[in-house]
């Protein structure tokens, strides 16, 4: 038997199959909010005990030597390390886990190139308001600045992507800094970074673990909530717009009570379809890109809008379906935990900095007895009529329209008349999707077309890339969601272009104790959003928009030990999705469903961001130097 050397060998006993791992000491269990007596321990033990104090049980990344001193303690500490195929995917998994559970998770990898791969998911989590712990082991102090192996400025690259960052300057401060970084992430609901030179590990220190501080959130200022309650009490047509802040504050039920008191139709912000119960009579659907016409028609009639827990991002207010729906003369009440976001995109009559749930409770208490009574019956009747009309229209929408002067969608239907359109596929999917399922959606044209279809009875069910808009989000985020919700069906969606960015994760998610998921990949063999722009502004001069038609995603899944199936009809899609979800829940099977679609293209993402190019000097290939 080979000898086990170093600190790992201390205190071990040996069984017939080798060393028996020592238990992680449970003495002086670290409880948040309680003062602790000083302890003698190693820096990595101090680090892990601080994680335990905050209940951080899941870490996503790729193993590396710079983090091994702490990852060595993870199994004994009750922390699960999910070894991914790529750090970018690991970060998206952490986002999916935390958004669906409300529990903080951790990203960690090797210093240098491992950490650089976290830039995209960390910025994604920042705009998704996801509290995550980013642990960035750094090159050693004794070599830093010499351009050594795997050295890079790790603090600088995340400066604008985290709410707080701090580097450990002394081994005796490792717990203090880690505790502060975690609490900043929680208080700001965003990623926060701790940077640790790798030669600070394996040092022996003695100090008390941090006490920890929980800050009470605010219900807003008295004057602002009083003014908002007066506006809502006097409103003839109040409308509520629920954003991510309602979900983060666990305030959906409070917003329901407020809506019922006012008989106010409730819209959901773009990509937050789960911010209000989809089966509630006052729910009218999502605003913004490919959203609900019923929501747009309702908010266009508002004389008072309560924007609850939202920074009013542009995608939630841009025109769609040719409708300029944002009410220019309505009084706007904006509630956001971050005061810097209030009034940033729309003129605000009352700004309230505070927790969406606590503010909603305060408004409920301050409303007059007559609040919501003006035009209540007519308003409720109109909501029902508009919802019914939109549901019927959405059900009848089979194909995407061409702009005047363009014919791409017409040609796409003629080229492959046997294939499903994106909307036919989305209707089939929603017919068989379990009511309690968690869904993720990637960036891209086919996924965007589906924005109006899903609704949810409870929050933390809908994962989307958010306003940073990274391709490759749909697959890894659902893997993280399943880690946190093993008893709930999870289904991810991506186009073939976006899925290609995260496809390497099929090599990892089938091994060990990874939980099973179901992934839908829409195959139209093109970068759809970019191709749509090209049809509108660049005369079908397609540059870089075509994908390899010979790639077989379902076969690749099979080669990685997963289930894979390709479908081409509505009936095949419905059956394949049913079987895949049953396999996920009953047989622990991960299934990739490859869905062949025609090449129809929906609305461009931003009509306001594009315009037809103008050539002045003219470009010719003959001008190229030899």
Image (cartoon, rainbow, N blue to C red):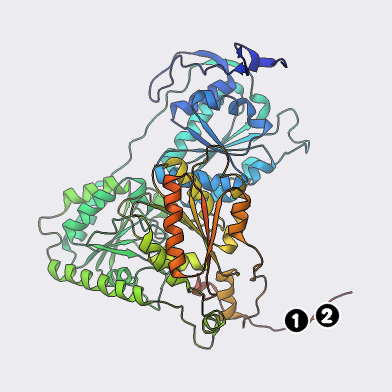
| SS type, badge 2 | helix
Q: Around disc 1, counting alpha carbons within 10 Å, would you say few (fewer than 14), some (14 to 19), or many (20 or more)?
A: few
Q: Quadrant of the N terminus?
A: top right
- Residue 612 position, x and y percent, is 59, 81
Q: Residue at x 75, y 81 (%)?
A: 619
Q: Quadrant of the C terminus?
A: bottom right
494 and 468: which is toward the camera: 494
435 to the left or right of 441? left
| SS type, badge 1 | loop
Verify CB contact (< 8 Å) between mark 1 and mark 2.
yes
Q: Quadrant of residue 392?
A: bottom left
Find the distance from the CA under tag 1 to the CA under tag 2: 8 Å
Q: Residue at x 39, y 76 (%)?
A: 397
User: Is residue 522 placed above or below 413 in the rendered structure?
Assistant: above
In the rendered structure, find residue 619 and report the number of the disc placed on it.
1
209 to the left or right of 159? left
As drawn, the residue found furthest toward the bottom would be 405
As drawn, the residue found furthest toward the right would be 626
- Residue 523 position, x and y percent, is 56, 66
In the rendered structure, find residue 381 and report the number of the disc placed on it.
none
Q: Residue at x 36, y 66 (%)?
A: 287
Q: Around disc 2, counting alpha carbons within 10 Å, would you say few (fewer than 14), some (14 to 19), or many (20 or more)?
A: few
Q: Quadrant of residue 183?
A: top left
425 and 498: which is toward the camera: 425
- Residue 608 position, x and y percent, is 50, 74
Q: Which residue is mark 2?
A: 623
> Taking the image as drawn, is residue 463 in sight?
no
Q: How many marks?
A: 2
Q: Residue at x 50, y 30 (%)?
A: 79
> Taking the image as drawn, is residue 546 in sight?
yes
545 and 534: which is toward the camera: 545
């Amino acid at each position: 038997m080979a000898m086990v050397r170093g600190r790992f060998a201390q205190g071990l006993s040996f069984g017939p199959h080798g060393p028996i791992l020592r238990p992680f000491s449970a003495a002086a269990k670290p409880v948040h909010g309680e003062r602790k007596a000083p302890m003698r321990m190693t820096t990595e033990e101090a680090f892990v005990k601080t994680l335990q104090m905050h209940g951080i049980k899941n870490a996503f990344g790729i193993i590396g030597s710079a983090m091994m001193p702490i990852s060595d303690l993870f199994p004994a500490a009750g922390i699960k390390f999910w070894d991914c195929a790529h750090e970018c995917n690991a970060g998206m998994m952490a986002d999916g886990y935390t958004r669906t559970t409300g529990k903080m998770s951790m990203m960690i990898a090797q210093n240098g190139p491992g950490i650089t791969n976290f830039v995209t998911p960390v910025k994604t989590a920042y705009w998704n308001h996801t509290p995550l712990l980013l642990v960035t082991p750094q090159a050693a102090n004794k070599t830093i600045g010499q351009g050594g192996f795997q050295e890079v400025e790790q603090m600088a690259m995340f400066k604008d992507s985290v709410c707080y960052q701090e580097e450990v300057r002394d081994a005796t401060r490792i717990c203090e800094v880690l505790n502060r970084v975690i609490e900043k992430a929680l208080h700001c609901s965003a990623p926060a970074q701790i940077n640790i030179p790798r030669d600070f590990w394996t040092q022996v220190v003695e100090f008390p673990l941090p006490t920890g501080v929980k800050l009470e959130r605010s219900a807003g200022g008295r004057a602002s909530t009083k003014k908002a309650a007066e506006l809502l009490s006097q409103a003839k047509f109040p409308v509520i717009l629920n954003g991510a802040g309602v979900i983060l504050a666990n305030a959906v039920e409070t917003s329901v009570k407020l809506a019922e008191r006012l008989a106010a139709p409730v819209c959901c912000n773009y990509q937050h379809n789960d911010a209000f119960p989809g089966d509630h009579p006052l729910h009218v659907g999502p605003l913004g890109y490919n959203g609900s016409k019923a929501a747009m028609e309702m908010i266009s009639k508002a004389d008072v809008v309560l924007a609850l827990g939202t920074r009013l991002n542009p995608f939630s207010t841009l025109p769609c379906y040719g409708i300029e729906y944002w009410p220019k003369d309505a009084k706007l009440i904006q509630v956001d935990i971050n005061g810097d976001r209030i009034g940033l995109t729309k003129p605000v009559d009352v700004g309230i900095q505070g927790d969406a749930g606590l503010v909603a409770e305060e408004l409920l208490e301050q409303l007059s007895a007559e609040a919501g009574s003006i035009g209540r019956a007519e308003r409720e009747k109109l909501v029902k009529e508009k919802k019914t009309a939109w549901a019927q229209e959405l059900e009848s929408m089979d194909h995407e329209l061409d702009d005047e002067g363009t014919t791409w969608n017409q040609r796409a239907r003629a080229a492959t008349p046997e294939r499903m359109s994106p909307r036919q596929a989305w209707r089939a999917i929603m017919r068989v999707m379990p009511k309690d399922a968690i869904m993720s959606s990637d960036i891209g044209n086919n996924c965007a077309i589906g924005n109006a279809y899903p609704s949810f009875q409870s929050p933390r069910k809908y994962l989307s890339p958010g306003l940073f808009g990274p391709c490759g989000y749909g697959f890894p985020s659902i893997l993280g969601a399943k880690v946190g919700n093993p008893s709930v069906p999870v289904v991810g969606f991506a186009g073939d272009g976006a899925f290609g960015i995260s496809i390497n994760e099929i090599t990892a998610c089938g091994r060990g104790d990874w939980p099973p998921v179901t992934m839908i990949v829409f195959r139209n063999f093109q970068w759809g959003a970019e191709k749509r722009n090209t049809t509108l502004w660049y005369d079908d001069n397609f540059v870089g928009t075509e994908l390899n038609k010979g790639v077989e995603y379902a076969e690749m899944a099979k080669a990685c030990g997963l289930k894979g199936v390709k479908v081409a009809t509505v009936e095949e899609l419905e059956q394949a999705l049913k079987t895949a979800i049953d396999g996920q829940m009953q047989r622990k099977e991960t299934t990739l469903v490859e869905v062949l679609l025609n090449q129809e293209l929906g609305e461009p993402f931003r009509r306001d961001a594009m315009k037809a190019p103008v050539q002045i000097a003219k470009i010719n290939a003959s001008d190229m130097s030899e």
